[in-house]
Image (spheres, helix red, strand yellow):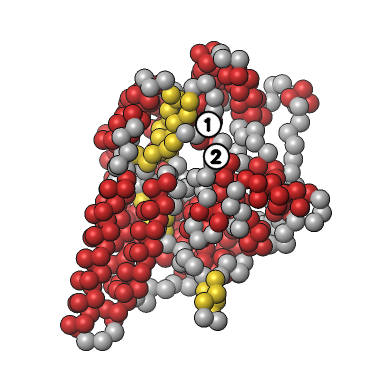
Amino acid sequence: MPSSITGFFILGQGFVFLLLALAFGSYYIGDRRKKQEIIAASLFSLSIVSLLSPLYLHRSSSPVNKVVESYKYNIPEWEISHASRQLLQRMTHPFSRPDPTSADSIAKLKAFFDLNRQISSTKAQLATAEARGQATDISTSQDSLRVLSSKQDMQKFEAELILERLVAQEALKEGMTRGFLGMRFMWPPVGLSIENRPTILAVSPRDHIQLDMSALLKSGVSRDTRESIEGGIASLDLSGLVIGIGGVATYPAILPDDGDLESALEISAHEWLHHYLFFHQLGRNYYASGQMTSINETVANMWGKEIGTRLYCQYFTKCAPEVAPPPIIVPPPPATSPSNVFDFNREMRSIRLKVDEMLKQGKIEQAEAYMEDRRKFLVENNYIIRKLNQAYFAFYGSYGDEPSVVSPIGDQLRIIRLENGTVGDFIRQVQVIGNVEEFDAAFAEVSNGG
């Protein structure tokens, strides 16, 4: 997901890097002196763009930004140290274009994500112990993570290339191309970087649930630091939550280095669609309102899940991929389900509705106490949630297909999807939407059989 309005500046910066990468390709053509001149000019341009980025990223002096200033994720630094390194890797491996569907590529990707599974398992043990307040041997876990991460680094570049080509292949099948001078091509190219992902701070008012702002923070933020940041936000009479995220729509997109293969395919497709929508009305209006943010994220989720599932089922496991999204299922009233059977989706929706009602009545402290009580209940049922507050619901409320969401946007988009033969057709229908009124009109047309 784009983390802020300035994220769009960074995304634009990423596309400048892409153009630089094309210039780097000239390294393999012509005389050596010309090659050196092109590389020097490209690196100079890269440095200028990167050095100017902080002027846009750190110009805000809001109280919230002051709380997190020292913890902010430095995207310009990341672009220089990681994205530019990735471009150089491609420059030194110009013919590294593996067939993503070959048996060798599939085996390599499986092996890489098996390694990631081990990393994820190690991190999960630590997170579970922290959420339950149990002591753990931190140094042993850190040593294990260092060894696994070293192996991961050696395999990462090739895994990124295979993932990129898998997603690009499906996007092309869906006709996600643009025309120029009588030619059709996919824009932008899929760009991925598997990294130690950043965390994100979500901020909501206390008296109602609304995502007021979000900020990318450094990766590996400890539990104590998260609590300290959230305490600083609370001192401003706001609700804050520091949480991990699946991916970040920088260019290239950041994918978590501890995820599984199925989620990596889904996130890769999800983040590429943000890049694609950057060039269309829907993406350019991402921050026009909370509803437009929700529409963007839900559309990206739907595309990501459909493309990711298709790839996973076709190449990595035996399953029956869906040819269309599942029908909309309205959750039954609580009384129709056995009271002794725990249902996470039903529980989260119930909590959200109860909290909304309490906040409308001005019972802020009571709502916060209720959320903490229900969080403990969720942990008892093996759903490890460190903090459940207004910011939690505000952040996940951006995704219309999450169980805690009460907005109709998710259901409306699923109805529009069902009216389109392919997911590519669905994207082409919604990508032209620039505001909520246009979305309502598109939904009304579909609902009326137009």
Separation (CA) of disc 1 from disc 2: 8 Å
On screen, residue 152 versus residue 384, left or right, reads left
Label drawn at residue 335: none
Label drawn at residue 290: 2
Relative to the observer, which residue lies in front, 50 or 106?
50
SS state under label 2: helix
- State the residue position of label 1: 210
Name the spot of residue 386 as percent of width and height, x first.
45, 27
> Relative to residue 303, is residue 373 depicted above or below?
above
Give residue 90's quadrant in the image: bottom left
Name the spot of residue 383 as percent of width and height, x first.
54, 30
Give the residue drawn at x 70%, y 52%: 442
Give the residue drawn at x 36%, y 51%: 195
SS state under label 1: loop
On screen, residue 344 versus residue 154, left or right, reads right
Indicate the amino acid at tag 2.
Gly
On screen, residue 188 versus residue 64, left or right, reads right
Precedes in sequence: disc 1 or disc 2: 1
Relative to the observer, which residue lies in front, 205 or 129?
205
Name the spot of residue 144 as percent of width and height, x first.
31, 42
Assess whether mark 2 and mark 1 are in contact (beta carbons under 8 angstroms).
Answer: yes
> Relative to residue 105, is residue 435 depicted above or below?
above
Q: Residue furthest right?
A: 449
Name the spot of residue 198 as percent of width and height, x first.
37, 43
Can the viewer see residue 336?
yes
Give residue 308's quadrant in the image: bottom right
